[in-house]
Image (cartoon, rainbow, N blue to C red):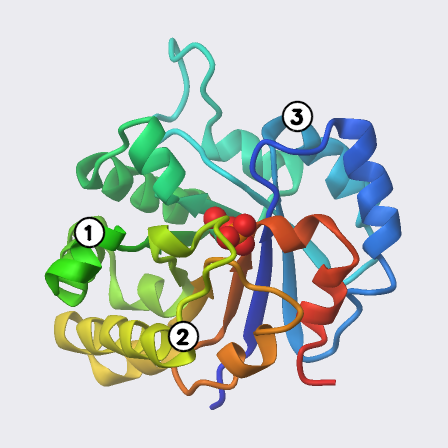
Amino acid sequence: MARRKIVAGNWKMNMTPSQAVALCAELKDLVKSDDVDVVYCVPAVDIVPVVEAVKGTNVEVGAENMYFEEKGAYTGEISAAMLVDAGVKYVIIGHSERRDYFKEDDVLLNKKVKKAFEAGLTPILCCGETLEQREMGITLDWIRMQIKSDLVGVSAQQVASMVIAYEPIWAIGTGKTATTEQAQEVCKAIRDCIAEVYDAATAEAVRIQYGGSVSAANAAELFAQPDIDGGLVGGASLKADFGKIVGYNK
Ligand code: PGA
């Protein structure tokens, strides 16, 4: 069975609640699609108003982060149960900005992935290399290490249902997109890694996105690659262009 494409916006630390509602209204008709899953991953305070704003549309809502503990004395954190109760379906885990600025490591991210599944959320697990790692020629080793460590104890059935986003750090927010060959090479390596750790059917089912300066101009070529099942989109998800990315095949 062909994998369904999934295009997710990562709003990052943008959009106040009222701006978020206005953006949902602006994008509503532009992101309509029968063949692509559309997700807005939004800041925590925007979740409740955005869930309300997209009611009755094809858009699902995701969070940009969560904590792995059930509940309790973790000031400032948000639990998986809170997200589920608010109507969230997806959660980004291990974005490079969280790994870099907030020192999230693979041991922590593995706990978050497992908790997300336990709560019924679909993780969008991010991985990606720095420019230095790419130049050293260790990109594929690095990515395989991230994927393997972040998925310790996660079942084949869970992996088959999740989303993995390959985001080369040097391509994020820089306007410097990976070439389609580079993006396809790493997305295929991720799929091969899943086949090796799990099995061919799980590798065939898992959806792998490319992220890093995805735009209306490059989405069609990227998403046409055999192992790229859509995109995780930062900057371009905050404007009308996001509709063109969702409708890349039109
Ligand atoms: P960008 O961000 O599209 O602005 O490069 C992508 C991301 O960080 O998910």
Q: Nearer the viewer, residue 234 or 147?
A: 234
Determine which residue is flagged by label 1: 132
- Disc on res. 11: none
Considering the numbered disc 3 on the image, is that residue within a helix, a strand or a loop? helix
The x and y percentages for residue 207 are 43, 71
The three-letter amino acid code for the residue at tag 3 is Val
User: Looking at the rendering, in which quadrant would you find the C terminus?
Assistant: bottom right
Real-space Cα separation, disc 2 to disc 3, in angstroms: 35 Å
The three-letter amino acid code for the residue at tag 2 is Thr
Real-space Cα separation, disc 3 to disc 1, in angstroms: 35 Å
- In-image side of 28 versus 120 (left or right): right
- Disc on res. 179: 2
- Crowding at dot 1, Cα within 10 Å, few <14 / some 14-19 / many 20+, comes out as few
Nearer mark to the viewer, of 2 and 3: 2
Which residue is found at the position 23% from the left and 75% from the top? 189
Determine which residue is flagged by label 3: 45
Real-space Cα separation, disc 1 to disc 2, in angstroms: 17 Å
